Amino acid sequence: MSNSESKKNTSEVKDRREFAFDRTNFILLAIGMAVIIIGFLLMTGPASTEAFFEPDIFSVRRIKVAPAVCFLGFIFMIYAVLRKPKTQDI
């Protein structure tokens, strides 16, 4: 192996170690985003109109459960961002 090839290999390894996130961080971010989307989907439902009042807008699912699910999703995403990737010694 020539000197230039060894420098190239060490620079590639160094670049891979300098990423802020590893694969696990991205997976955790995707899971957090999915939980947030589920929370917003739980908030959806029929709307009230001027002609008809829909009492479902005050349901427990839309008032308490869905915001709690979204909040947990945001907390999970914060954890995914702050999680420190494990370093691999070469």
Image: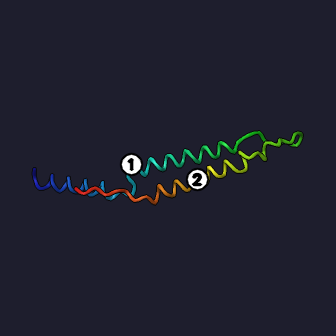
Picture disc at residue 23: 1
The alpha-carbon separation of the residues under discs 1 and 2 comes to 21 Å
- 10 to the left or right of 72: left
Which residue sits at x=21%, y=56%?
A: 10
Which residue sits at x=59%, y=48%?
A: 36
Measured as percent of width and height from the top left, residue 23 is found at: 38, 48
Q: Quadrant of residue 85?
A: bottom left
The residue that disc 2 covers is 72
- 68 to the left or right of 24: right
Q: In the figure, 34 relative to 81: above or below?
A: above
What is the crowding at mark 2: few (fewer than 14 residues within 10 Å), some, or many (at least 20)?
some
What is the crowding at mark 1: few (fewer than 14 residues within 10 Å), some, or many (at least 20)?
few
Furthest toward the right, the residue is: 51
Which residue sits at x=26%, y=58%?
A: 14
Which residue sits at x=43%, y=52%?
A: 25
Q: In terms of secondary structure, where does tag 2 sit? A: helix
Q: In the figure, 53 relative to 20: above or below?
A: above
Measured as percent of width and height from the top left, residue 6 is found at: 15, 54
Nearer the observer, disc 1 or disc 2?
A: 2
Q: In terms of secondary structure, where does tag 1 sit? A: helix
Q: Which amino acid type is marked by label 1?
A: Arg
Residue placed most toward the observer, 49 or 79: 79
Q: Which amino acid type is marked by label 2?
A: Leu
Give the quadrant of the C terminus.
bottom left
For marks 1 and 2, the one nearer the N-term is 1
Measured as percent of width and height from the top left, residue 82 is found at: 46, 60
Furthest toward the left, the residue is: 2
Q: Quadrant of residue 86?
A: bottom left
- 78 to the left or right of 51: left
Picture disc at residue 33: none
